Image (tube, grey):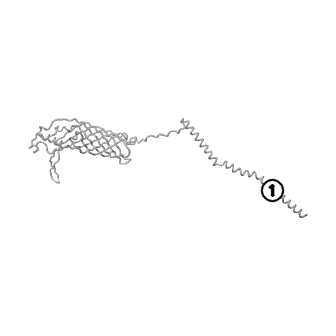
């Protein structure tokens, strides 16, 4: 009986102690719940107020409102929602002492050589030969220029021209006089040339790359000369080798005529490099000199070898047409 009472007392004490401990634990948990709540809410509050999220949202919002405000101002100023027009810069200006505003050189020069070919009625009297030219002038822009030019074109004489002229010089002479050299001519030869000063507007045609083209026309003063020659014998003395005779053609008759003529043609150019002003050129022109044929004295009744002053070759003052073909350098 005593043992049962002792066991019951111990069990009651244990239960009371357990209940007390459980109550203490619940009280401690109740007292700590506000602190736990604060620790749970603090990270949420800090996260909601963190810089990256708020700054990104704020920046996006401010940028949107700023761009909207700028667009509104531009729209009010221009009367539309279109962006303002781009600024126009225009063409560059290269004007200087030696260049035009478009970059072309102000001054130009040329020099060339080539062939001179008579055509039309002129071809009946003369044969092709050589020629040369040089000149200079002013470029007003890349398209238009003006050249002052000197040309010299040389021609031979046809065989029938020399035969007819020989007949004129020998007319009225006897065979004995011709053989003795006291009348007429022997071994007649001759040549013709035209020199001129002309003013020539030049138009450069639009092309791309190194190859270019141009058109030219102009006019000016033309001087035409025909010389007839005969072999003559002369003597030359040298202090080291002594004197000796030589044979050379001597002019026995001479004719000239002057006229205002015109010319026109086309040319091609090729630049040495992309940035160079020097160019090869090849051109062909048509030249027309409207001379008026003049007749005068002939050698028909004159038995002398001094033919100066005779108009025994009226063809020198015929209308003259020929084509000079020249190549050279322009710069």
Residue 80 is at least partly visible in this image? yes
Regarding residue 309, the answer to whether it shows in the image is no
**Foreground of the two, 257 or 128:** 128
Mark 1 surroundings: few (<14), some (14-19) or many (≥20) residues within 10 A: few
x and y percentages locating residue 300 in the rendered image: 13, 38
Element assignment for label 1: helix
* Left or right, 99 with reference to 165: right
Q: Tell me where residue 305 sits by quadrant.
A: top left
Residue 34 drawn above or below residue 298: below
Q: Could you say where residue 237 lies in the image, as x and y percent from the top left?
A: 16, 51
Q: How many marks?
A: 1
- Tell which of 193 and 32 is nearer to you: 32
Residue at the extreme right of the image, as rendered: 1
Q: Residue at x 80, y 56 (%)?
A: 22
Tell whether 159 sits left or right of 111: left
* Residue lying at the far left of the rendered structure: 176
Write down the quadrant of residue 291 in the picture: top left
Q: Percent from the top left, x then y, of residue 109? A: 32, 43
- Residue corresponding to mark 1: 22
Q: Foreground: 319 or 297?
A: 319
Which part of the image, by quadrant, shows the C terminus? Answer: top left
Please state if 204 lies on the left or on the right of 28 as rendered: left
Percent coordinates x, y for residue 117 in the rendering: 25, 43
Image quadrant containing the N terminus: bottom right
């Amino acid at each position: 009986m005593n043992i049962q009472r002792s066991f019951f007392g111990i069990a009651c004490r244990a239960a009371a102690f357990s209940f007390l401990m459980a109550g203490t634990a619940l009280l401690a948990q109740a007292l700590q719940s506000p602190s736990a709540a604060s620790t749970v809410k603090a990270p949420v509050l800090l996260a909601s107020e963190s810089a990256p999220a708020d700054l990104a949202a704020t920046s996006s919002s401010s940028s949107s409102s700023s761009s909207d405000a700028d667009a509104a101002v531009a729209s009010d100023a221009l009367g539309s929602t279109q962006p303002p027009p781009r600024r126009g810069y225009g063409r560059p200006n290269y004007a200087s002492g030696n260049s035009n505003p478009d970059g072309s050189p102000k001054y130009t020069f040329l020099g060339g050589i080539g062939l001179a070919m008579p055509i039309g009625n002129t071809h009946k009297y003369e044969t092709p030969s050589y020629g040369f030219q040089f000149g200079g002038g002013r470029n007003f822009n890349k398209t238009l220029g003006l050249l002052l030019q000197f040309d010299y074109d040389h021609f031979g004489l046809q065989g029938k021209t020399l035969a007819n002229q020989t007949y004129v010089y020998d007319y009225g002479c006897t065979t004995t006089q011709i053989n003795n050299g006291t009348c007429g001519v022997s071994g007649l030869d001759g040549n013709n040339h035209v020199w001129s000063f002309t003013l020539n507007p030049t138009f450069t045609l639009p092309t791309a790359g190194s190859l270019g083209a141009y058109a030219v026309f102009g006019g000016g003063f033309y001087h035409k000369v025909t010389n007839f020659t005969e072999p003559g014998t002369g003597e030359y003395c040298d202090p080291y080798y002594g004197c000796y005779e030589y044979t050379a053609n001597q002019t026995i008759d001479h004719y000239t005529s002057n006229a205002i003529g015109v010319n026109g043609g086309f040319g091609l150019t090729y630049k040495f490099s992309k940035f160079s002003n020097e160019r090869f050129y090849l051109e062909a022109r048509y030249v027309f000199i409207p001379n008026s044929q003049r007749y005068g004295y002939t050698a028909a009744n004159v038995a002398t070898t001094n033919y100066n002053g005779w108009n025994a070759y009226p063809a020198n003052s015929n209308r003259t047409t020929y084509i000079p073909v020249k190549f050279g350098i322009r710069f």
